[in-house]
Image (spheres, grey):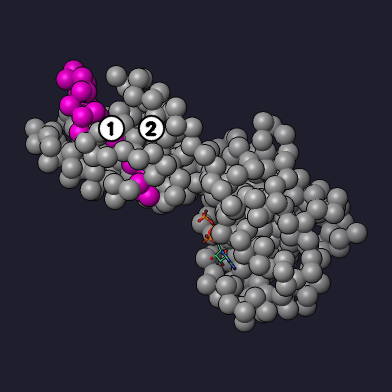
Amino acid sequence: MIKKIGILTSGGDAPGMNACIRAITRTAIYNNMEVLGFIRGYEGLIDNKFLELKRESVSGIIQKGGTILKTARSERFRTDEGMQFAVNHLKENNIEALVVIGGDGSFRGAIELSKHANIPIVGCAGTIDNDLVGTDFTIGYDTAINTAIEAIDKIRDTAESHDRIFVVEVMGRDAGLIAIRSAIASGAEAVLVPEIKQDTDDLIKKIKNWRSTKSSKIIVVAEGDESGGAYKVADIVKQHNPEFDVRVSVLGHIQRGGNPSCMERVNASIVGFNAVKALLNGKSGEMIGIVNKQITFTPFEKAVKHHQKLNKDLEELIEVLSS
Ligand code: ATP
């Protein structure tokens, strides 16, 4: 029997992390465990900073964005000294199992930690990028794409009124999933993502073929696209089409914030609940995911090895539907 567990949120924050913390805490307490929530991800393990989480500690947080445990990217955790502090504090606090909520980097950290700390560690995929293999949706993704399309809808209103082209940059350093989905859902005319090589000539050709009766045009660019981002794309468009009024909008961090969507809250609750059940069933070193509505367990090594693939047919869909 596990008597005491730790939870931490690590890497970039994502809406729905609180719903997951709540589910883990309440499921653990229901199963007679104590729960410590470490503050600022692996930094909290290194500095021994934590909150004792009770049922009431997680009241009123399911609807809130961000993470009550705060999060961080910890360079110290990559050092031998940092790792040793973390391991010592887990022991000192009698932590018998750990749940890590974060993205692929956080799971790489969990792999390293499990080489030094002799306790089971499981993970819940929390990242707005949705780039992990082994789950259909990561915590934060659904809310982020909904925030993005809400913003793009507003940009469309002003673009339409002024007959402008807008280049909108959305998050996604290595993955174009936010860009592709938000482009489809907002009726964008083009999308540029890191997974699909597209030279500028293609884009220029595309623009030349746009219907003249369309008064506004929206190009969605993932921040990690090789074009170099929205400002560079806007410059190219302007260069080749001086007749167009081209504007840029970088959505930035608003995509990380806000109240999680219904789907986010439900999925985060399911994943958190199953993380504790997985520990009770003796699992370790695995990420809990949802694939085709079924709970799945993916070894950390596999989850971090590849990025979830983009369905490239969706690019054609955008082209056809925006014609
Ligand atoms: P997001 O997808 O939102 O960026 P992430 O979990 O991928 O989230 P990272 O910054 O890549 O975010 O990783 C979070 C933290 O995990 C790092 O700051 C570091 O502390 C830890 N980490 C990552 N890789 C390693 C590693 N190889 N060894 C030890 N710790 C690591």
Quarter containing the N terminus: bottom right
Cα distance in 3D space between marks 1 and 2: 8 Å
> Residue farthest to the right?
1
The picture quadrant where one finds residue 114 is bottom right
* Location of ligand 1 given as a quarter of the image: bottom right
Image point 18% across, 42% down: which residue? Answer: 236
Q: In this view, does 58 lie to the left or right of 15?
A: right
Residue 15 image offset from top left, x and y in percent? 54, 47
Task: Quadrant for residue 269, please give it.
Answer: top right
- Would residue 77 be counted in the magenta stretch? no
Q: Does the residue labelled 1 lie within 8 Å of ligand 1?
A: no
Residue 155 vertical placement versus 41 (above, below): above
Nearest to the observer: residue 178 or residue 263: 178
Left or right: where 272 falls relative to 307: right
Q: Is residue 289 above or below residue 98?
A: above
The amino acid marked with disc number 1 is Ile
Residue behind mark 2: 183
Instruction: Name the image quarter holding the C terminus.
Output: top left
Q: Give the mark nearer the N terminus: 1 vs 2.
A: 2
Q: Where is residue 97 in the image (x, y as percent from the top left)?
A: 78, 62
Secondary structure beneath dot 1 equals: strand
Q: Which x, y percent locates residue 2?
A: 86, 60
Residue sitting farthest toward the bottom? 81
**Residue 273 % position (x, y):** 75, 46
Residue depicted at x 67% and y 31%: 292
**Tag 2, which secondary structure?**
helix
Is 275 placed above or below 239 here? below
The dot on residue 1 is none
- Which mark, by number, is residue 218? 1
Q: Give the range drawn in magenta.
A: 204-225
> Which amino acid, by three-letter code, is at mark 2?
Ala
* Badge 1 vs badge 2, beta-carbon distance below 8 Å: yes
